[in-house]
Image (tube, grey):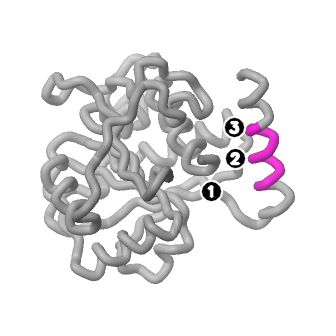
Amino acid sequence: MDHLKFIKHIILLVTFTIWLPAQAFSIARIHYGGGGDWYADPSSLPNLLEYISEHTTILVEPNEYRIKLTDPELFSHSYLYLTGHGNIRFTEDGVGYLRDYLLKGGFLHADDNYGMDASFRREMKRAFPDKEWVALPFDHKIFHAFYDFPKGLPKVHEHDGKPPQGLGLFDGDRLMAFYSYESDLGDGWEDAEVHHDPQTIRQTALKMGVNIVWFSLTQ
Protein backbone atom coordinates (compact mmCIF):
# COMPACT_ATOMS: atom_id res chain seq x y z
CA MET A 1 0.00 0.00 0.00
CA ASP A 2 1.50 3.41 -0.98
CA HIS A 3 1.76 6.44 1.30
CA LEU A 4 -1.48 8.07 0.09
CA LYS A 5 -3.48 4.86 0.52
CA PHE A 6 -2.02 4.42 4.00
CA ILE A 7 -3.22 7.90 4.97
CA LYS A 8 -6.72 7.16 3.62
CA HIS A 9 -6.63 3.87 5.51
CA ILE A 10 -5.94 5.70 8.80
CA ILE A 11 -8.58 8.36 8.12
CA LEU A 12 -11.24 5.72 7.53
CA LEU A 13 -10.17 3.85 10.66
CA VAL A 14 -10.53 7.05 12.73
CA THR A 15 -13.94 7.70 11.21
CA PHE A 16 -15.27 4.27 12.18
CA THR A 17 -13.61 3.93 15.58
CA ILE A 18 -13.95 7.45 16.99
CA TRP A 19 -16.76 9.37 15.33
CA LEU A 20 -19.11 6.47 14.58
CA PRO A 21 -18.27 3.83 17.20
CA ALA A 22 -21.75 2.30 17.23
CA GLN A 23 -22.08 1.94 13.47
CA ALA A 24 -20.72 -0.65 11.11
CA PHE A 25 -20.71 -0.94 7.36
CA SER A 26 -23.51 -3.09 5.99
CA ILE A 27 -24.66 -4.35 2.60
CA ALA A 28 -28.37 -4.47 1.80
CA ARG A 29 -29.39 -6.81 -1.00
CA ILE A 30 -32.36 -5.60 -3.05
CA HIS A 31 -35.37 -7.92 -3.12
CA TYR A 32 -37.01 -7.00 -6.43
CA GLY A 33 -40.01 -8.34 -8.36
CA GLY A 34 -40.34 -9.63 -11.91
CA GLY A 35 -39.40 -13.25 -11.33
CA GLY A 36 -35.63 -12.94 -11.29
CA ASP A 37 -33.59 -14.70 -8.59
CA TRP A 38 -32.67 -11.68 -6.49
CA TYR A 39 -31.38 -14.12 -3.83
CA ALA A 40 -28.69 -15.65 -6.10
CA ASP A 41 -25.23 -16.51 -4.73
CA PRO A 42 -26.29 -16.71 -1.06
CA SER A 43 -22.76 -17.19 0.30
CA SER A 44 -21.27 -14.32 -1.70
CA LEU A 45 -21.97 -11.27 0.46
CA PRO A 46 -21.13 -12.90 3.82
CA ASN A 47 -17.81 -14.03 2.30
CA LEU A 48 -17.10 -10.56 0.95
CA LEU A 49 -17.92 -8.95 4.27
CA GLU A 50 -15.63 -11.39 6.06
CA TYR A 51 -12.83 -10.61 3.59
CA ILE A 52 -13.32 -6.88 4.11
CA SER A 53 -13.18 -7.35 7.88
CA GLU A 54 -9.98 -9.40 7.67
CA HIS A 55 -8.09 -7.24 5.16
CA THR A 56 -9.15 -3.65 5.91
CA THR A 57 -9.93 -1.46 8.91
CA ILE A 58 -13.62 -1.24 8.02
CA LEU A 59 -15.94 -2.39 10.80
CA VAL A 60 -18.62 -4.54 9.15
CA GLU A 61 -21.90 -6.22 9.88
CA PRO A 62 -21.08 -9.89 9.09
CA ASN A 63 -24.36 -10.74 7.35
CA GLU A 64 -26.22 -9.09 4.53
CA TYR A 65 -29.53 -7.33 4.95
CA ARG A 66 -32.35 -8.11 2.52
CA ILE A 67 -34.77 -5.30 1.75
CA LYS A 68 -37.28 -4.09 -0.78
CA LEU A 69 -36.88 -0.60 -2.19
CA THR A 70 -40.12 0.38 -0.47
CA ASP A 71 -39.00 -0.78 2.99
CA PRO A 72 -38.77 2.04 5.57
CA GLU A 73 -35.18 1.09 6.48
CA LEU A 74 -33.88 1.68 2.93
CA PHE A 75 -32.28 4.99 3.86
CA SER A 76 -30.52 3.51 6.89
CA HIS A 77 -28.18 1.65 4.51
CA SER A 78 -25.45 3.42 2.56
CA TYR A 79 -24.75 0.51 0.19
CA LEU A 80 -27.20 -1.50 -1.91
CA TYR A 81 -26.39 -4.64 -3.88
CA LEU A 82 -28.41 -6.15 -6.70
CA THR A 83 -27.82 -9.33 -8.67
CA GLY A 84 -29.63 -12.21 -10.38
CA HIS A 85 -30.10 -14.09 -13.65
CA GLY A 86 -33.64 -13.27 -14.74
CA ASN A 87 -36.11 -10.44 -15.07
CA ILE A 88 -35.89 -7.45 -12.74
CA ARG A 89 -38.91 -5.27 -12.09
CA PHE A 90 -39.28 -2.38 -9.64
CA THR A 91 -42.65 -1.07 -8.49
CA GLU A 92 -43.52 2.53 -9.29
CA ASP A 93 -42.89 3.48 -5.68
CA GLY A 94 -39.65 1.51 -5.71
CA VAL A 95 -38.39 3.46 -8.71
CA GLY A 96 -39.02 6.72 -6.88
CA TYR A 97 -37.40 5.54 -3.67
CA LEU A 98 -34.32 4.29 -5.53
CA ARG A 99 -33.96 7.59 -7.35
CA ASP A 100 -34.23 9.56 -4.10
CA TYR A 101 -31.87 7.18 -2.32
CA LEU A 102 -29.14 7.54 -4.92
CA LEU A 103 -29.52 11.29 -5.33
CA LYS A 104 -29.30 11.75 -1.56
CA GLY A 105 -25.91 10.04 -1.36
CA GLY A 106 -26.62 6.30 -1.42
CA PHE A 107 -24.61 3.85 -3.50
CA LEU A 108 -25.71 0.90 -5.62
CA HIS A 109 -23.57 -1.98 -6.86
CA ALA A 110 -25.36 -4.05 -9.50
CA ASP A 111 -23.54 -7.28 -10.38
CA ASP A 112 -24.48 -9.01 -13.63
CA ASN A 113 -25.01 -12.67 -12.85
CA TYR A 114 -25.94 -13.34 -16.49
CA GLY A 115 -29.40 -12.74 -17.88
CA MET A 116 -30.34 -9.59 -15.95
CA ASP A 117 -28.77 -6.99 -18.23
CA ALA A 118 -31.70 -5.91 -20.40
CA SER A 119 -34.23 -5.70 -17.56
CA PHE A 120 -31.79 -3.98 -15.19
CA ARG A 121 -30.96 -1.28 -17.74
CA ARG A 122 -34.68 -0.83 -18.42
CA GLU A 123 -35.50 -0.34 -14.73
CA MET A 124 -32.62 2.08 -14.16
CA LYS A 125 -33.83 4.06 -17.17
CA ARG A 126 -37.20 4.37 -15.45
CA ALA A 127 -35.45 5.86 -12.43
CA PHE A 128 -33.08 8.08 -14.42
CA PRO A 129 -34.47 8.66 -17.92
CA ASP A 130 -31.96 11.42 -18.66
CA LYS A 131 -28.85 9.54 -17.55
CA GLU A 132 -26.66 7.08 -19.45
CA TRP A 133 -24.23 4.44 -18.23
CA VAL A 134 -20.61 5.47 -18.69
CA ALA A 135 -17.81 2.95 -19.28
CA LEU A 136 -15.23 3.68 -16.58
CA PRO A 137 -11.64 3.97 -17.81
CA PHE A 138 -8.99 1.70 -16.33
CA ASP A 139 -7.48 4.63 -14.42
CA HIS A 140 -10.73 5.37 -12.58
CA LYS A 141 -10.27 5.41 -8.81
CA ILE A 142 -12.61 2.47 -8.24
CA PHE A 143 -10.00 0.20 -9.87
CA HIS A 144 -7.24 1.52 -7.58
CA ALA A 145 -9.10 2.39 -4.38
CA PHE A 146 -7.42 -0.27 -2.24
CA TYR A 147 -5.97 -2.87 -4.62
CA ASP A 148 -4.69 -2.07 -8.09
CA PHE A 149 -6.53 -3.36 -11.14
CA PRO A 150 -4.59 -1.81 -14.04
CA LYS A 151 -6.79 -3.59 -16.60
CA GLY A 152 -10.05 -2.68 -14.92
CA LEU A 153 -12.76 -5.12 -13.91
CA PRO A 154 -11.61 -8.76 -13.67
CA LYS A 155 -13.27 -11.60 -15.57
CA VAL A 156 -14.68 -14.31 -13.28
CA HIS A 157 -17.06 -16.27 -15.53
CA GLU A 158 -17.29 -16.23 -19.31
CA HIS A 159 -21.01 -15.72 -19.99
CA ASP A 160 -21.14 -14.47 -23.60
CA GLY A 161 -17.39 -14.16 -23.90
CA LYS A 162 -17.59 -10.38 -23.89
CA PRO A 163 -14.94 -8.37 -22.03
CA PRO A 164 -15.90 -7.29 -18.51
CA GLN A 165 -17.00 -3.71 -18.14
CA GLY A 166 -17.28 -1.41 -15.15
CA LEU A 167 -20.13 0.97 -15.90
CA GLY A 168 -21.07 4.01 -13.88
CA LEU A 169 -24.10 6.19 -13.36
CA PHE A 170 -23.17 9.66 -12.12
CA ASP A 171 -24.80 12.50 -10.25
CA GLY A 172 -22.45 15.28 -11.27
CA ASP A 173 -18.98 14.00 -10.38
CA ARG A 174 -20.25 11.45 -7.86
CA LEU A 175 -20.52 7.81 -8.88
CA MET A 176 -23.85 6.77 -7.41
CA ALA A 177 -24.24 3.38 -9.14
CA PHE A 178 -21.61 0.90 -10.32
CA TYR A 179 -22.57 -1.92 -12.69
CA SER A 180 -20.13 -4.82 -13.01
CA TYR A 181 -21.13 -6.25 -16.39
CA GLU A 182 -19.88 -9.53 -17.93
CA SER A 183 -17.67 -10.16 -14.90
CA ASP A 184 -19.80 -11.99 -12.29
CA LEU A 185 -17.97 -10.94 -9.16
CA GLY A 186 -20.64 -12.55 -6.97
CA ASP A 187 -19.82 -16.03 -8.28
CA GLY A 188 -16.20 -15.37 -7.36
CA TRP A 189 -17.23 -14.43 -3.83
CA GLU A 190 -19.19 -17.65 -3.31
CA ASP A 191 -17.93 -20.59 -1.26
CA ALA A 192 -15.15 -22.40 -3.13
CA GLU A 193 -17.13 -25.61 -3.62
CA VAL A 194 -20.02 -23.85 -5.41
CA HIS A 195 -18.29 -23.02 -8.70
CA HIS A 196 -14.88 -24.63 -8.16
CA ASP A 197 -13.10 -21.50 -9.35
CA PRO A 198 -9.32 -21.38 -8.84
CA GLN A 199 -8.26 -19.62 -5.67
CA THR A 200 -6.58 -16.91 -7.73
CA ILE A 201 -9.90 -16.05 -9.39
CA ARG A 202 -11.72 -15.97 -6.07
CA GLN A 203 -9.07 -13.75 -4.51
CA THR A 204 -9.21 -11.38 -7.47
CA ALA A 205 -12.99 -11.14 -7.23
CA LEU A 206 -12.87 -10.49 -3.48
CA LYS A 207 -10.22 -7.81 -3.88
CA MET A 208 -12.32 -6.05 -6.49
CA GLY A 209 -15.24 -6.22 -4.08
CA VAL A 210 -13.09 -4.51 -1.45
CA ASN A 211 -12.29 -1.79 -3.96
CA ILE A 212 -15.95 -1.11 -4.70
CA VAL A 213 -16.83 -0.88 -1.01
CA TRP A 214 -13.76 1.21 -0.16
CA PHE A 215 -14.46 3.56 -3.05
CA SER A 216 -18.10 3.98 -2.02
CA LEU A 217 -16.98 5.08 1.45
CA THR A 218 -14.19 7.43 0.39
CA GLN A 219 -15.17 9.02 -2.94
* Residue in the picture at 48% in, 63% down: 65
Q: Which residues are magenta?
A: 8-16
Are the residues tagged 1 and 2 within 8 Å (C-beta)?
yes
Q: Name the residue carrying label 1.
A: 25
* Residue found 18% across the figure and 25% down from its top: 162
- Name the one closer to the observer, 12 or 173: 173
Name the residue carrying label 2: 58
From mark 1 to mark 3, how far is it between C-alphas? 12 Å
Viewer-closest of 215 and 45: 215
Residues at discs 2 and 3 in contact (Cβ within 8 Å): yes
Residue 102: % across, % down: 44, 65
Q: Main secondary structure of the magenta part?
A: helix
Q: Position of residue 27 (x, y in %)?
A: 51, 57
Q: In the drawing, what numbered circle is on residue 188?
A: none
Quarter assignment of residue 9: top right
Cα distance, mark 1 to mark 2? 7 Å
**Which secondary structure lies at badge 2?**
loop
Answer whether residue 72 is magenta in the image: no
Left or right of residue 84, residue 201 in this image = right
Q: Is residue 74 above or below residue 164?
A: below
> Disc 3 marks which residue?
56
The vertical placement of 136 against 179, above or below, is: above
Q: Amino acid at mark 3?
A: Thr
User: Amino acid under label 1?
Assistant: Phe
Give the answer, above or below, for where 95 lies relative to 135.
below
